[in-house]
Amino acid sequence: MDYQILALVHIAAVISLAGLALHRVFASYGGPAWATPVIIGCLIGIAIACNAIRALIDRSRVGRQETERAVMQQRYPNCHVSLLKDGSWFLTDRATGREYQPDASGAMVPASPQNQRRQ
């Protein structure tokens, strides 16, 4: 939480310094005094819009992953389902603890001989 406040303070300082620099540039060329706040306001608005779009994309990605996880849980009800970083699924049988990976046809095959637990 403290780092967020510190980041906001830094952002406010950068915006105020940029505003001061823009004001001096516009003043030296005889530009209107209202141009600096308008430009800064537009930049802040663009940043807010980009952040909202990114949040929407992240929410849809998370929703899609949860839907895929639910489908895999329904397909293999006796297994614990984990999504690996490479996008493949890793299944662990809840009763025996054996580890599986579904192949292209959807059948469960042992993950690898090294990972199999002996019973």
Image (cartoon, rainbow, N blue to C red):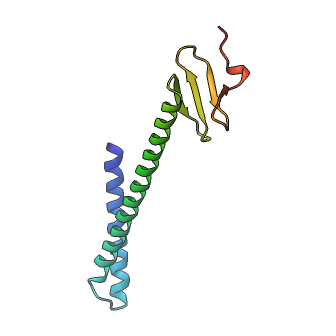
Q: Nearer the viewer, residue 26 or 68?
A: 68
Q: Residue furthest bottom?
A: 30
Residue 100, placed above or below residue 12: above
The image position of residue 24, as x and y in percent, is 35, 81
Residue at x 50% of width, y 41% of height: 68
The image position of residue 2, as x and y in percent, is 32, 43
Pick the quarter of the image with the N terminus: top left
Residue at x 40% of width, y 63% of height: 50
The image position of residue 85, as x and y in percent, is 59, 39
Q: Residue furthest left?
A: 34
Q: Nearer the viewer, residue 51 or 15?
A: 51
Residue at x 58% of width, y 36% of height: 84
Residue 1, placed above or below residue 114: below
Q: Nearer the viewer, residue 59 or 102?
A: 102
Residue 74, placed above or below residue 30: above
Count numbered badges in the picture: 0
Report the side of 28 relative to 76 (left or right): left
Query: Looking at the rendering, which quadrant does residue 38 occupy?
Result: bottom left
Report the side of 119 relative to 49 (left or right): right
Query: Looking at the rendering, which quadrant does residue 107 occupy?
Result: top right
Report the side of 63 relative to 44 (left or right): right
Residue at x 34% of width, y 50% of height: 6
Pick the quarter of the image with the C terminus: top right
Q: Residue furthest right?
A: 113
The image position of residue 102, as x and y in percent, is 63, 32
